Image: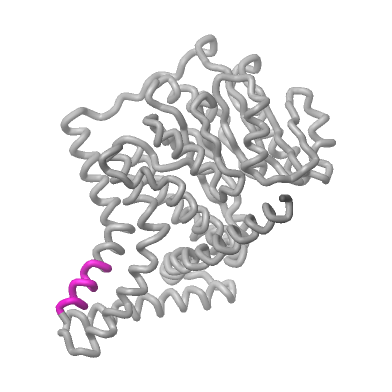
């Protein structure tokens, strides 16, 4: 029974630390850092003459429905026109995307008839790059007018190799629970990213809006599921930092329903596991101890250990209760059961289109962790299909 109790407390500590403890610890460290070193001063945005040249790269596949809206948003960006280039990479597109882009002479269209995936498209675009920095965004995300100047301001710090903007999620209509759950998650995630950045570096950038110094780009495997995360974390691996700013943001609609959101989360979970393996050198605390601390706390635990710990915690708690280990374990099991029942009710209500934020929050939390297991299966399938495609080409 002693072994079971030790395992119980170990699993509980992992779950608590991953979702609550790290945020508390990070906040306390940041507060202490401000007391000792002072609050970081915001560097002024350089004048137009001092701004570096910048390309906004949009990788798109068959996005004819959003070309007009995206271009209206892009042309509203406040940046000197002689220093700002717009590039659409449309590899494999066979709809009217390229035809519609002909109406915009300021756009550089990079096209290849073969579709090899987003990572390959990014590489294709980078080969045509002619500016000092490049920012990436999606065709269906709209960015604020001051985003590029804010990114340029942060690149004035020579320790910065990547700038990550903020992702904001909007619902298409009121009560769209998938989008609202995603928005709640991203608000919490944005807070952690801001604190991570202030401590040392954000742990990865989201593809909705981020920028890099192209001289620091590493070769990302074409099979990468999270090309944005890999590209940005390779920069951290090389000793540069990722700055995070909410003043450069991209807004997109959340998933229309939980089925679509599940597919997206499953792919992210699979990409996270894939990235842990490719970035395993960051797990060595003797190389970059602060990066290792932030990376494990913010990414590795969520994408690998903690979902398994939640399952083990429930099983061990049930065993301890069956063995009459004490009142505390009885209460702990009851609380776990209540939580998962709450999540189940949230799932049932969401299926019927009903709205209850408390129940839905519990459901979304369980849903995210369940998709880590689905991501494991997805990654196995992805790897096998990749091996099969290689075999067919050889």
**Residue 274 visible (yes or no):** yes
- State the residue at coordinates (21%, 69%): 9
Position of 145 with respect to 298 (left or right) is right
- State the residue at coordinates (58%, 35%): 136
**Residue 175 visible (yes or no):** no
Residue 129: x and y, percent?
64, 24
Residue 130: x and y, percent?
64, 20
Residue 90: x and y, percent?
74, 38
In the rendered structure, which segment of residues is drawn in magenta? 2-11
Q: Nearer the viewer, residue 331 or 253?
A: 331
Residue 280: x and y, percent?
39, 47
Position of 53 with respect to 274 (left or right) is right
Vertical arrangement, residue 140 with respect to residue 182, above or below: above
Vertical arrangement, residue 358 with respect to residue 394, above or below: below
Disc tally is 0
- State the residue at coordinates (80%, 40%): 113
| Residue 157 is a magenta residue | no
Position of 385 with respect to 283 (left or right) is right
Vertical arrangement, residue 169 with respect to residue 335, above or below: above
Quarter where residue 160 is shown: top left
């Amino acid at each position: 029974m002693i072994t079971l109790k030790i395992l119980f407390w170990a699993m509980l500590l992992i779950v608590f630390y991953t979702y609550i403890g790290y945020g508390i610890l990070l906040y306390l460290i940041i507060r202490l850092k401000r007391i000792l070193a002072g609050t970081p001063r915001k560097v002024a945005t350089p004048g137009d003459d001092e701004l570096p040249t910048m390309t906004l790269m949009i990788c798109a596949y068959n996005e004819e429905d959003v070309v007009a809206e995206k271009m209206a948003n892009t042309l509203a960006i406040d940046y000197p026109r002689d220093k700002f280039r717009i590039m659409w990479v449309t590899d494999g597109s066979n709809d009217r995307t390229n035809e519609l882009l002909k109406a915009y002479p300021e756009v550089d269209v990079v096209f290849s008839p073969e579709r090899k995936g987003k990572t390959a498209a990014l590489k294709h675009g980078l080969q045509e790059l002619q500016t000092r920095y490049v920012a990436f965004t999606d065709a269906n995300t709209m960015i604020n007018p001051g985003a590029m100047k804010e990114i340029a301001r942060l690149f004035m710090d020579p320790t910065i190799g990547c700038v990550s903007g903020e992702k904001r999620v909007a619902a298409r209509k009121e009560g769209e629970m998938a989008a609202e759950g995603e928005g709640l998650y991203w608000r919490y995630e944005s807070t952690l990213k801001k604190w991570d950045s202030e401590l040392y570096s954000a742990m990865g950038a989201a593809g909705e809006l981020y920028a890099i110094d192209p001289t620091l780009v590493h070769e990302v495997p074409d099979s990468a599921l999270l090309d944005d995360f890999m590209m940005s974390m390779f920069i951290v691996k090389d000793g540069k930092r990722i700055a995070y700013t909410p003043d450069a943001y991209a807004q997109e609609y959340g998933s229309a329903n939980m089925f679509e959101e599940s597919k997206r989360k499953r792919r992210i979970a699979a990409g996270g596991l894939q990235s842990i393996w490719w970035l395993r050198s960051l797990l060595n605390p003797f190389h970059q101890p602060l990066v290792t601390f932030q990376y494990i706390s913010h990414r590795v635990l969520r994408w690998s250990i903690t979902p398994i710990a939640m399952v083990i915690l429930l099983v061990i708690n049930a065993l301890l209760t069956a063995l009459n280990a004490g009142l505390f374990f009885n209460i702990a099991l009851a609380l776990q059961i209540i939580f998962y029942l709450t999540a189940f009710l949230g799932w049932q209500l969401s299926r019927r289109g009903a709205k209850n934020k408390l129940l839905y929050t519990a459901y979304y939390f369980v849903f995210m962790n369940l998709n880590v297991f689905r991501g494991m299966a997805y990654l196995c399938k992805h790897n096998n299909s990749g091996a099969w495609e290689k075999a067919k080409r050889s």
